[in-house]
Amino acid sequence: MKSPNVSRRGFLQSAAFATAAAGVAPRVLAAANDELRVAVIGAGGRGNEMARAFAATEGVRVVAVADPDQQRASSLADKYDATAVTDLRRVLDNADVDAVVVTTCNHWHCLASIWALQAGKHVYVEKPLSHTQWEGQQLVAAAKNSGLVCAIGTQQRSDPMQDEIKNFLHKERALGSIHYVQANRLGPRASIGRRSSPLPVPAEVDYDLWLGPAAKEALYREKLHYDWHWDFNTGNGEMGNWGVHILDDVRNVAYQDSVTTPKAITAAGGRVAWNDAGDTPNVHYALLETDSFPTLMALSNLHATPDGKGSWKCPIHPRVKNPSSGYVVVCEGGYFAGQRGGGKAYDSDGKSIRTFKGGSQVPRHVQNFVDAVRQNDPSILNASVETGHYSSGWCNLANVAFQMGRSYDHQQLTSHSDRPAWPELVRQMEAQLKPFGATTNDLVCSARLEHDPKTERFQGEEAQRANALLKREYREGFAVPQLVEA
C-alpha cells in the first residue's frame, strides 16, 4: 500500500540510487537562523521520542517521516505537518531534507545511514550503530569520505556529569588504580511467545522494505514491531539494546576511550525459562579483556524469582549499591557505581564519599548534533560515528562469542581469568537459574576468543568461524557497500 503523501520524484531502485546519490553536496546553513530540516526514518517508539526532541530544538523542523508501516509513518508525520512516505529512499531524494534521524530496526541502521550520507544528508543514528561489526566499519568510512556530520544516539555522552566522574577517577585518582569494571544490565523482560503458524504481516506494512538487508524468514513471535530486538536476523539482543549504553559509559568513563575494542572475549548464556520464538540470550555474561583492566558484563532479563517479582542482583560489595543498569569501577581504594543520571563513590568499607548528579541528556545531545551541522564540524560531536562504532563493537563481539558457544563447561569458562571476580560472577549466574528450573544444559559457553583491535578481526584457533560472524549475507538490492577491505 502506497503512502498518500510522497516526494515529487517517486520510487528509486536501491542500486541506481546508491550510484546517483554518491557525492551529492549538502545545503550549507549560511546563517544562524537558517532552518535545519530533518527527516525521521523509523516511526516506532524511539522515532516518536526523537522527533519530539528535534522539533523542540530551536531552529529545527521535522519535514518528513519514513516508515515501511504506512500507519505509523502517517501518524507521526501528522504531528508535525510533515510528509509521510513508506520508502526511506524518497526522503533521501528530497532536496528539502538537510539531515536524517535514523530510528529504524537495528538491521537498517548502517545501510540507511550510508545511503543518507551518499545523498548529502547529515546523520543522527540511534544505537547500536551497527548490526554487525563489518558494516559499522563501512559506515565510519562513509562518514569520513563524505565530510558530513554523523552522530550516534548514546546520549549519556552529553551529560556534564561524565567529565566530573572522569576527573574524580583519573585526575584526582581519588580511589586509586582501577582493578576491573563490572557492567550490569539486569532488567526483567517477558517472553515474546511462540506461534504454531507464521505471523501474518499487517497489510499496511511493506514487508520487503521492512526486511531490507535482513534475510526473509517466517516469524513465529506474536508481534512484528519491537520484538525484532530478540531475533539475531534483525536485532542485537539486550546486549545491543541496553548493553551498548552501559558499555559506552565504561569506555568513556573507565577507559577514557583509550581502548577501542577488547583483545579477548569469553561469553556464556542462553535463552532460558521462556521457550519462545526469540534466539538472542536472555542471560548473557561476558569477560571482555583489554591491555589495562578487564570488564565483566552481567546481563539478565529474568526476574529475581520465577513468580515475576524483582530484578536479579549481582552484588560487588555488601554495602555498595550495585546499579541494575549501570557499572561499578572497582579500584584499589574503593568503588564507583554509575548509571544513567547519577553515580556514587564509596571507600573500601562501602561508605559513600561522593555523589554525582546527572543533567539533561537528550536535549543536550540533540543540540550538540545541531551545532555540529550548523558549523559543518564533526569534530565537536560528543558521540561521533567512530565512537559509536567501537562501543557497539563491544556488544557485537560479545554476541559473536555467544553465537560461538558450545556445551557449557564451568571449569573451562572460569579458567579464562586469574581474577576471582569472574568465577564469582559465573557462580552467581548459575545460582540465578536454579529457581527457574534451568540447568547448565540450557547454557552455552565460548572458548576465549582472541581479537585484534587494530584489524577488528579474530585471531587464533577459532578465528575462521568467529570472523564469519562479523558480516552478514545481504538480500539483493539492500547490501551495505564495501568501503573498507576486510
Image (spheres, rainbow, N blue to C red):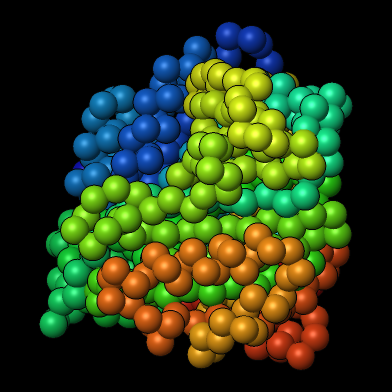
Looking at the image, which is closer to me, 430 or 466?
Answer: 430
Residue most extreme to the front: 349
Q: Position of residue 85 (x, y in %)?
A: 32, 46
Visible in this render: residue 94? no
The C terminus - image quarter = bottom right
Horizontal relation, residue 403 to residue 194: left or right: right
Residue 288 appears in which quarter of the rendering?
bottom right
Residue at 58%, 45% (x, y): give it.
Answer: 317
Residue 353 appears in which quarter of the rendering?
top right
Exactly how many numbered labels are in the figure?
0
Horizontal relation, residue 466 to residue 126: left or right: right
Residue 373 appears in which quarter of the rendering?
top right
Residue at 29%, 48% (x, y): give it.
Answer: 310
Visible in this render: residue 355? yes
Residue at 60%, 20% (x, y): give it.
Answer: 355
Q: Where is residue 209 in the image (x, y as percent from the top left)?
A: 36, 63
> Is residue 362 shown above or below 109?
above
Q: Position of residue 208 (x, y in %)?
A: 33, 68
> Is residue 245 shown above or below 50?
below
Looking at the image, which is closer to me, 388 or 110?
Answer: 388
The N terminus - image quarter = bottom left
Residue at 56%, 63% (x, y): give it.
Answer: 425
Horizontal relation, residue 257 to residue 138: left or right: right
Q: Where is residue 463 in the image (x, y as percent from the top left)?
A: 73, 85
